[in-house]
Amino acid sequence: MGKSIIVGCETLGRGDGDLGARLVADDSPVLDALEALDRQGVDLAACGTCLAHFGLQERVAVGRESNMQEIISVMLGPGETLTV
């Protein structure tokens, strides 16, 4: 299995609590960078519960909707996880 990268905020330290779900939305300030990662085969998975909470299910512009069970499984599974 490959490496996992977790992006929790757009700065070092703690960011806005809803930032992760908003990063994949159509108005994301980092949409171009995420689209470039997507084109390179990076699996971008956003928490479906978070997307629903912020009303973003219909605004996902890159990546796919996932769930915390899958996300935690990837994080704890074989391979490496990098948190930025």
Image (cartoon, rainbow, N blue to C red):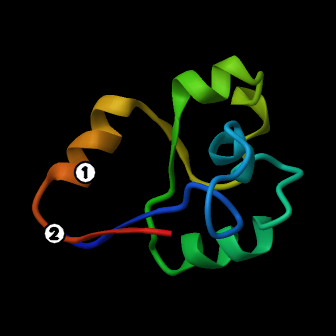
Q: Secondary structure at mark 1?
A: helix
Q: Position of residue 68 (x, y in %)?
A: 37, 31
Label 2 Cα neighbours within 10 Å, binned few <14 / some 14-19 / many ≥20? few
Q: Position of residue 48 (x, y in %)?
A: 53, 28
Q: Secondary structure at mark 2?
A: loop
Earlier in the chain: of badge 1 and badge 2, it is 1
Tag shown at residue 31: none
Q: Amino acid at mark 2?
A: Gly
Q: Is residue 21 above or below residue 38?
A: above
Mark 1 highlights which residue?
Answer: 74
Q: Position of residue 18 (x, y in %)?
A: 70, 37
Residue drawn 16% across the image and 69% down it? 79
Specify whether 10 is left or right of 80. Answer: right
Residue drawn 73% across the image and 44% down it? 16
Residue drawn 84% across the image and 49% down it? 26
Marks 1 and 2, Cα distance to the nearest angstrom? 8 Å
Specify whether 61 is left or right of 84. Answer: right
Q: Quadrant of residue 10?
A: bottom right
Q: Is residue 36 above or below residue 42?
A: below
Which sits in the foreground, 16 or 4?
16
Q: Amino acid at mark 1?
A: Val
Mark 2 highlights which residue?
Answer: 79
Residue drawn 63% across the image and 53% down it? 14
Specify whether 79 is left or right of 45. Answer: left
Q: Position of residue 50 (x, y in %)?
A: 60, 27
Q: Is residue 34 above or below residue 40?
A: above
Label 1 Cα neighbours within 10 Å, binned few <14 / some 14-19 / many ≥20? some
User: Are the residues flagged by discs 1 and 2 in contact, CB closer than 8 Å?
Assistant: yes
Q: Quadrant of residue 83?
A: bottom left
